[in-house]
Image (cartoon, rainbow, N blue to C red):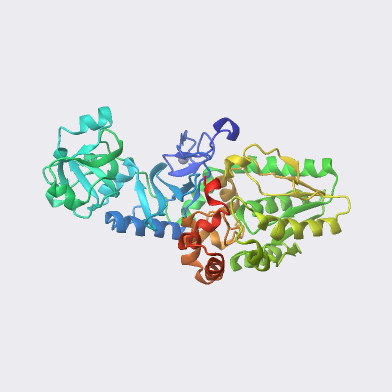
């Protein structure tokens, strides 16, 4: 997979404590180190609401009282899969995974050892288990589990399946006097506290990861979110200028070569906003101006925030955006049932149909549309060429000038240009498409439910009603609707 995607760009400057996309930092010129994120590796900055969700979850789980993220730029990297997982990157290191636990229907954090050190450092007293001094060697050498005789202390709040911090016992542990140098590993409890206390043998915890105790490398504070973003822009000036001029050059050349009317597809998302800004730079050039249209397709499932953003962008850049709208979703969904991961009828009805009609009418001889598709978005997009024929709209050729950009390139470029990105990104969302989509994980659904209850209610009312008519159960309403034929298509 790595060879298809190319290198993961995310690196970090230890000296300035900011993410850097090149080998050296643009502020101090020192060499950067690679951040080992999970591929495809499309990290993004964490906004205030993301940090609030993470700190709230850490408080509930581990009793964290201190804001360990204060005045630092934190990144989140979404790991691929059916469940919601975000790697949390602090000081250039992954300190844990934010997960929506579908069984317990709640947020939780699975700390890494580095995360465990930081939690202990910040005075956390929950979910702690200590082992006797002769136990670490078995765990480190052979990956053994923690057995009851090896346990010397266990905090009362531990329940079976909890993520726990595994420490080596010390003389002051009964006063909760722990140091990060006591941290041996992280694991998962196999018994409740009461069972541990009353048994003499058995497996108490499975060790997920263990290593020799060490001190964590805490880097300097970079200031408020805005100040930290300013530093990040400075540290990446070269990389962003290089990517920008490459993409602008590519757009100019492609427009000349293809000789078709040009358009830019704007969706209200960060990637298409980037393409739009690049198009303005490439084509609103007084020496060689090129006309281009901007297309926006309203699927009927847009957040109000997205519609507002489209209007704002339209006015701000004087675009006169051409809008298409299907307006058929709510009628068709009664007939077809919810669109599924294995049954995406919505794409034809809500997008391809209305857009195809517009293109047919407006561009008799076809058009070239610049879109914001990036290979780091998913493995399935990693093999795309930079120009291709639309598989669904005959007269449309598509081209992505930002195919090689990572989400960090996009974000730094947008911050640098003070671009009006959709506010939904500041509300814990990674993507801002339809408010409901069968591709959503339960965690994402939960974010919509909590943040936009009225919007979600309309969909849930539909689901409940449909379930009544068609004999579907509660699981179907709460998430199984995302597959039309669940058994054969569960991935
Ligand atoms: Zn630096």
- Name the residue at the right extreme: 364
- Name the residue at the top extreme: 141
- Is residue 238 visible from the viewing direction of this image? no
All told, the count of numbered labels is 0
Name the image quarter holding the N terminus: top right
Residue located at (15% from left, 46% from top): 153
Residue 18 position, x and y percent, is: 46, 45
Residue located at (13% from left, 51% from top): 175
Residue 327 position, x and y percent, is: 70, 67
In front: 297, or 59? 297
In front: 219, or 398? 398
Residue 386 position, x and y percent, is: 71, 39
In front: 389, or 212? 389
On screen, residue 388 above or below 265: above
In front: 362, or 264? 362
Q: Quadrant of residue 401?
A: top right
Residue 325 position, x and y percent, is: 72, 65
- Is residue 385 visible from the viewing direction of this image? yes
Q: Is residue 431 shown left or right of residue 85?
A: right
Q: Is residue 184 shown left or right of residue 383?
A: left
On screen, residue 473 above or below 130: below
Residue located at (67% from left, 39% from top): 384
Q: Is residue 360 shown left or right of residue 79?
A: right
């Amino acid at each position: 997979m790595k060879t298809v995607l190319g290198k993961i760009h995310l690196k970090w400057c230890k000296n300035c404590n900011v993410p850097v996309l090149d080998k050296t930092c643009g502020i101090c010129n020192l060499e950067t180190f690679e951040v080992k994120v999970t591929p495809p590796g499309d990290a993004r900055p964490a906004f205030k609401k993301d940090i609030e969700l993470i700190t709230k979850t850490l408080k509930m789980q581990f009793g964290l009282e201190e804001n360990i993220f204060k005045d630092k730029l934190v990144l989140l990297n979404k790991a691929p899969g059916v469940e919601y997982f975000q790697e949390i990157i602090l000081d250039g290191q992954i300190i844990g995974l934010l997960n929506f636990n579908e069984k317990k229907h709640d947020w939780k954090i699975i700390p890494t050892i580095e995360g465990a050190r930081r939690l202990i450092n910040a005075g956390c007293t929950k979910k702690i288990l200590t082992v006797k001094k002769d136990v670490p060697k078995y765990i480190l050498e052979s990956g053994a589990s923690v057995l009851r005789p090896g346990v010397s202390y266990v905090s009362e709040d531990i329940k079976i399946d909890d993520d726990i911090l595994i420490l080596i016992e010390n003389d002051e542990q009964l006063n909760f006097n722990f140091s990060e140098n006591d941290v041996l590993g992280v694991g998962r409890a196999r018994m409740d506290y009461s069972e541990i206390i009353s048994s003499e043998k058995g497996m108490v915890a499975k060790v997920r990861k263990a290593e020799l105790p060490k001190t964590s490398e805490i880097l300097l504070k970079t200031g408020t979110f805005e100040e930290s973003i300013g530093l990040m822009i400075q540290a990446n000036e070269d990389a962003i200028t290089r990517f920008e001029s490459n993409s602008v050059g590519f757009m100019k050349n492609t427009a000349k070569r293809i000789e078709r009317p040009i358009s830019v597809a704007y969706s209200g998302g960060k990637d298409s906003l980037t393409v739009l800004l690049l198009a303005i730079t490439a084509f609103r050039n007084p020496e060689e101006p090129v006309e281009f249209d901007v297309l926006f397709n309203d699927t009927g499932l847009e957040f109000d925030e997205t519609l507002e953003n489209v209007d704002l962008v339209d006015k701000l850049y004087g675009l006169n955006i051409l809008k298409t709208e299907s307006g058929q979703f709510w009628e068709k969904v009664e007939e077809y049932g919810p669109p599924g991961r294995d049954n995406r009828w919505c794409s034809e009805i809500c997008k391809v149909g209305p857009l195809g009609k517009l293109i047919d009418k407006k561009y008799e001889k076809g058009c070239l549309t610049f879109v914001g598709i990036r290979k780091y978005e998913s493995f399935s997009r990693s093999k795309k060429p930079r120009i291709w024929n639309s598989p669904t709209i005959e007269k449309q050729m598509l081209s992505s000038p930002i195919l090689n950009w990572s989400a960090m390139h996009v974000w730094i470029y947008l911050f640098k240009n003070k671009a009006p990105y959709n506010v939904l990104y500041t509300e814990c969302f990674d993507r801002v498409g339809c408010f409901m989509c069968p591709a959503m994980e339960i965690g994402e659904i939960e974010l919509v439910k909590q943040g936009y209850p009225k919007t979600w209610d309309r969909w849930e009312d539909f689901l409940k009603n449909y379930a009544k008519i068609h004999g579907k159960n509660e699981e179907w309403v709460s998430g199984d609707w995302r597959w039309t034929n669940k058994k054969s298509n569960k991935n």
